[in-house]
Amino acid sequence: MASARSTVLRLYRDILRRGRHWKDGTEPAEARYIVEEARKLFRRNKDLDDQKAIHDKIKECESRVELAEHYGNPYPRMYYAQPGVIYKSGNRARKKINPDYMHSYYDEDEFGLNDAKDTK
Amino acid sequence: IAFACAMPRFVHRLVRSVRCLRVLDTSKFGTCVQARSFGAGHFLPKDEIEPRVLDCIKNFRDVEASKVGVDSDFSKDLGLDSLDTVELVLAFEDEFNIEIPEAQAESITNAKQAIEYISQTPFAK
């Protein structure tokens, strides 16, 4: 438990530092996004107890950081809806693509993506 | 050069800020910086650090300025959680233009320890 805590704090510090030096200050909006997103998501998940859930969140964090560094773009990737699927509220729902590293992002249901039921 | 001689402290800061210069041509600055050589750490005095650290804490969001003292613990007295403490230590780094490594950052739990650490950090501004 103690090592998970120190990992999380280390990641938090790492992200905030990256945000500070993001692209040497040429993109302040992106830097601000990084810091705010980190703050929001870390606080949202800070009361987790389950070891596996904590581990998943840590992996999620590391993935997002790596992707942001690699593509030079901190914002989440947009996905096309699968072709041929029409969104209808109720029975047939749009199959949403929710990669592992975006679970925390979509948790708050601000995009209404958690309404969709998997109709397999 | 005459202007620089009139303000040796300014010159020293100018010299320190140009860290990429490996070789410093001291002859250019003449007698201005004879007491200090490039590479010798310049430490800030504690009474200069203390008000800045306390200001940093007071301006931090969610902190009541009246509760802030040199010995007030971040989590017990000021009610900050560990994420807030990380942000606060980063704020110190910003203020003094230093980098605090992991191990030390985790050990800073009140203002006194922060002041202690910063006073031992060379090239803190």
Image: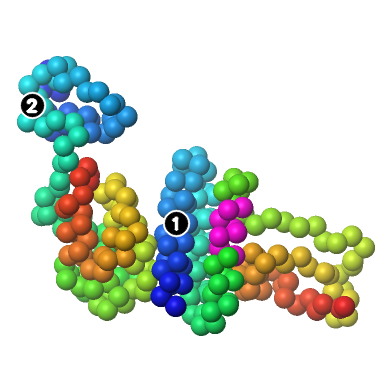
Q: Residue at x 46, y 72 (%)?
A: A4
Report x, y in % for residue A12. Answer: 45, 62
In the rendered structure, the residue with mark 1 lies on which chain?
Answer: A
Report x, y in % for residue B81. Answer: 37, 74
Q: Is the magenta stretch mostly helix, strand or loop?
A: helix
Magenta stretch: residue B14 in it?
no
Q: Is mark 2 on a helix, strand or loop?
A: loop
Q: Residue furthest bottom?
A: A49
Q: Do discs 2 and 1 share a chain? A: no
Magenta stretch: residue A63 in it?
yes
Q: What residue type is labelled 2?
A: Gln
According to the picture, the residue beneath numbered tag 2 turns out to be: B34
Q: In which quarter of the image is residue A91?
A: bottom right
According to the picture, the residue beneath numbered tag 1 turns out to be: A14
- Quarter in which the N terminus of chain A is drawn: bottom left
Q: In which quarter of the image is residue B112?
A: bottom left
In this rendering, does residue B3 appear at all? no
Q: In this view, does A48 lie to the left or right of B22?
A: right
- Give me the C-alpha separation between circle 2 and circle 1: 40 Å
Q: In this view, does B83 lie to the left or right of A107?
A: left
In the rendered structure, the residue with mark 2 lies on which chain?
Answer: B
Which residues lie in the magenta part? A60-67
Q: In this view, does A89 lie to the left or right of B28?
A: right
Q: Quadrant of residue B53?
A: bottom left
Disc on res. B48: none
